[in-house]
Amino acid sequence: MSEQQPLILIIEDESPMRGFLRVSLSSNGYRVTEAETGAEGLAQAAARNPDLVLLDLGLPDQDGLRVTERLREWGKMPIIVISARGQEEDKIKALDGGADDYLTKPFGIGELLARLRVALRHSAATPIGDSLFSVGALKVDLSKRQVTRSEREVHLTPIEYKLLTTLIKNVGRVVTHRQLLREVWGPGYGDQTQYTRVYMGQLRHKLEENPSRPQFLITEPGVGYRLRGND
């Protein structure tokens, strides 16, 4: 297998799940390395510098949230949490703690592979040098601060534009309400989730063909929002 293929670190204590992930990822062209505990996972991450980490939260030696925090002290690789914990609070804690995405067990390999592709593409992107973003009929010229839908210019308020560009910077990733509030409104607004709901509704009315059935401004219930790319 080519060394150029992405290396995925699986930190998971359940042997059947590790086996499922190993076979599924290897058969789809990924290189795989594994760890059963948080400590072993951190050591593997430091030694092998993986392109992406799949992390279970329920590890025997320490909580996966702590592993995420430790990885984020030095690593920029995408982290996708895979966990049986399906509560919104757990998802929010993981995403706020530095994870890029969250999958609740059980999940299909097709969905996992799609999330991997998005995370790896986002990791490899260089948005500073790329001033154009497009998905479907929506086009954003970041250098000109110009937004168009179906070739017609759309006027956004400063808050709406900041909200959209924050999602563009994180395209394909879940962004929590708290993250959006800090980025768009400032650190003192972390609990004002009604702001994101109101302004996201306004954005959808301006940018989506059918605001009640959005195609790219996607709600992650109770957690936040995801801007869907062209993947």
Image (cartoon, rainbow, N blue to C red):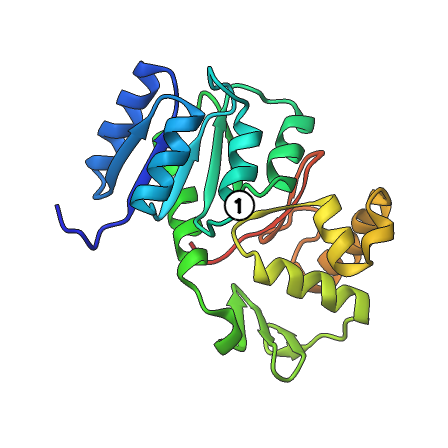
Q: Residue 31: where, in percent of width, then height? A: 23, 41
| Category of crowding for the residue at label 1, using alpha-carbon neighbours closer than 10 angstroms: few (below 14), some (14–19), many (at least 20) | some
The residue located at (52%, 51%) in the rendering is 172
Determine the image quadrant of residue 90.
Answer: top right
Amino acid type, mark 1? Arg
The total of numbered circles placed on residues is 1
The residue located at (26%, 21%) in the rendering is 19
**Which residue occupies the foreground of this view, 200 or 19?**
19
The residue located at (52%, 27%) in the rendering is 64
Q: Secondary structure at mark 1?
A: helix
Q: Residue 214: where, in percent of width, then height? A: 64, 50
Horizontal side of 83 relative to 205 (left or right) equals: left
**Residue at the extreme bottom:** 144
Q: Residue 146: where, in percent of width, then height? A: 66, 80
Asked if residue 202 shows in the view, the reply is yes
The image shows residue 176, relative to residue 25, as above or below, that is below
Determine the image quadrant of residue 137.
Answer: bottom right
Task: Report the residue marked by disc 1.
Answer: 72
**Which residue occupies the foreground of this view, 178 or 110?**
178
Determine the image quadrant of residue 26.
Answer: top left
The image shows residue 205, relative to residue 2, as above or below, that is below
**Residue at the extreme left:** 1
The image shows residue 142, relative to residue 219, as above or below, that is below
**Which residue occupies the foreground of this view, 78 or 218?**
78
Asked if residue 111 shows in the view, the reply is no
**Which residue occupies the foreground of this view, 129 or 151?**
129
Q: Quadrant of the N terminus?
A: top left
